[in-house]
Image (spheres, rainbow, N blue to C red):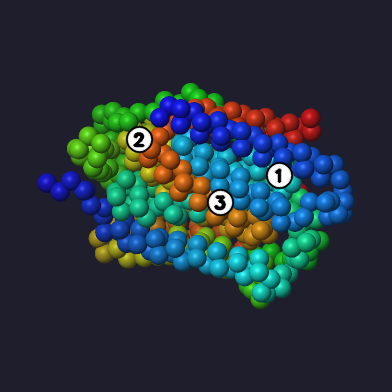
Amino acid sequence: MMRGSAALALFITIFLVALSMTGYAVASTEATSAPAAVASSNVPWWVWPLVLFVVTFLMGIVAVLGGVGGGVLFVPIISGFFPFHLDFVRGAGLLVALAGALAAGPGLLKKNMADLRLALPVGVIASACAIVGAMIGLALPTNVVQTALGAAILGIVGIMMMAKKSVYPEVKKPDALSTALRINGIYYEMSSDHEVSWQIHRTPQGLATFIVIGVMAGMFGLGAGWANVPVLNLMMGAPLKVSVATSKFLLSITDTSAAWIYVNNGAVLPMMVVPSIIGIMLGSIVGVRILAKTKPAAVRYIVIVMLLFAGGRALMKGLGW
Amino acid sequence: MDKKIRATEEQLAYANILELGMKAGLLMLIVTFIIYLSGLLPAFVPVNDLPKYWSMPVKKYLAATHIHTGWSWLYLLGKGDFLNFAGIAFLAGVTILCYLRIIPIFFRKKDTIYGVLAITEVLILVLAASGVLKSGGH
C-alpha cells in the first residue's frame, strides 16, 4: 500500500511538473511576441485545449486526494503556465468550481451533510459580495489582479499549513442570531454509528467574514472552499463534515453570481471552459476511486508546493519580475 | 430510531431540482461542445484564430472580435462557439430555479425570514444574470 501511494504521488508530481514546464516554455515564448506573432506560432490551436484537458484531469485527481477544491488549483496554475489571459482564466475557474459544486450539491443535501439553513444566509452575503469582487477584478489592471492573486494564493498556503480542524467543535451556547434563524441540525455519523447534534455560535462575525470571502471568490475566480471551511468550522463551530459539505454546496451559490458577471462581460471562452470542466470532473471521479483505496499523505504537500510555486509565479508576473 | 436523519422538505426539493438541472446542464454543455468541435455550425471566431485572442485582456478581445456583452450571445446561437453559452447559462441559472422552488415551501411553513432570504437571493442572482452590471475595464 505504501509503495503504491508513493508511486502514485511521484507519478502525479512528475506529470504535473512536466506539463507545467511545457506550458511555461511555450507560454513564455508566446508572451514575448505580439499577438499577431502568436497567431503564426507553430503550435496548432487544438494543442492548448488538449493540454488543458489533460492538466485539469490530473488536477481533479490531485484536488480530491489533497482535499482542496479544483478552483483554487485551476486559476493560479492555468494563469501561470498557459497562454490564456487572466480574465478568461478567472471566468473559467469560476465555472469549473461552479460545475463541481453543482455536481456534489444534490448528494450532500439529500444526505443532510450540507445544511440549507446554514448556507442560505451565508449565501446571500457571499453571492452579493462575489458580484462586487468580480466587477472589481474585471475593472482593475491585470498586473494588479495578478499581484493580488499571487499574494492571496500564498496566503491560502499559509491557511492550509496552519489552520487546525475540529471534528466536533464545542459550542456551549448558540448566539442570538443563529437561535433566531434556527441554524442547527442533526446528522448521522456513519463511522461511529451515532447521531451528531450541532449548533453554531459567533454567527454575526462569521457572516461578516463572508463579505471578504465573497469579494475574493469573485475577484480571483478561485472558488472559496479554502476559506469557507475554516470559518464555518473553527469560527462558527459547525462540525467538520457539515462545514466541508455546506462549503461545497455554498460554492454553487457564490460562484453562480460571480460567473454571471464574467459571462455577461465576455470573459468566458467555451474552448477553455468546457475541456476544463470535463477534465476536472473526470479527474475527480478517478480521484474518489483512488481515495477509496489509498490516501497518499504526500499529495497534500505536493498541492502546497504547487500552490507555492504558482502563487510565487503569479506574484512575480504581477510585479513584472 | 431512524439512523438516516432526513433532510427537510425544502432541502430535498432544492436537491431534486439541482440534480435535474445539473445533469441537463452538463449534457447540454457536452453536446454543444461536440457540435462546436465538429464544425457542424460555423464558429463566430474561427478556431484557428483563437490563439490570437485568448491571450488578450477581455476588453481588447471584445473590441477585436466585435462581440457585444450581456445577452447578445442569444442572437449568435447559430454559431458553433456561441451555442455553448446555452449550456453555460443553463448551469449558471440552475441555482435560481432551485430557490424559486423553495420560496413557496418556506412561506407555507410560515418560515418568513427564510422566505425573504430566498427571495433576496433570487434578486441578487437575477441582477447578476441580467447583464445590467458592467465592469469598468482596464
Q: Which residue is mark 3?
A: A279
The structure residue drawn at horizontal position 19% and vertical position 37%, both measured from the top left corner, is A194
The chain under label 2 reads A
Observer-side mark, 1 or 2, equals 1
The structure residue drawn at horizontal position 56% and vertical position 34%, both measured from the top left corner, is A11
Callout 3 amino acid: Gly
Mark 2 residue element: helix
Tell me how far mark 1 sits from mark 2, CA to CA: 35 Å
Q: Horizontal and vertical percent for residue A168?
A: 29, 31
The chain under label 1 reads A
Q: Which mark is residue A82?
A: 1
* Relative vertical location of residue A244 with respect to residue B32 in this rendering, above or below: above
Return the residue nearer the eye: A238 or A2.
Answer: A2
- Left or right of residue A312, residue A278 in this image: left
The chain under label 3 reads A
The structure residue drawn at horizontal position 77% and vertical position 38%, both measured from the top left corner, is A25
Decide which of tag 1 and tag 2 comes sooner along the chain. Answer: 1
* Relative vertical location of residue A301 with respect to residue A206 in this rendering, above or below: above
Q: Horizontal and vertical percent for residue A55?
A: 61, 45
Decide which of tag 3 and tag 2 comes sooner along the chain. Answer: 2
Q: Which residue is mark 2?
A: A240
Tell me how far mark 1 sits from mark 3, CA to CA: 16 Å
Return the residue nearer the eye: A188 or A276.
Answer: A276
Decide which of tag 1 and tag 3 comes sooner along the chain. Answer: 1
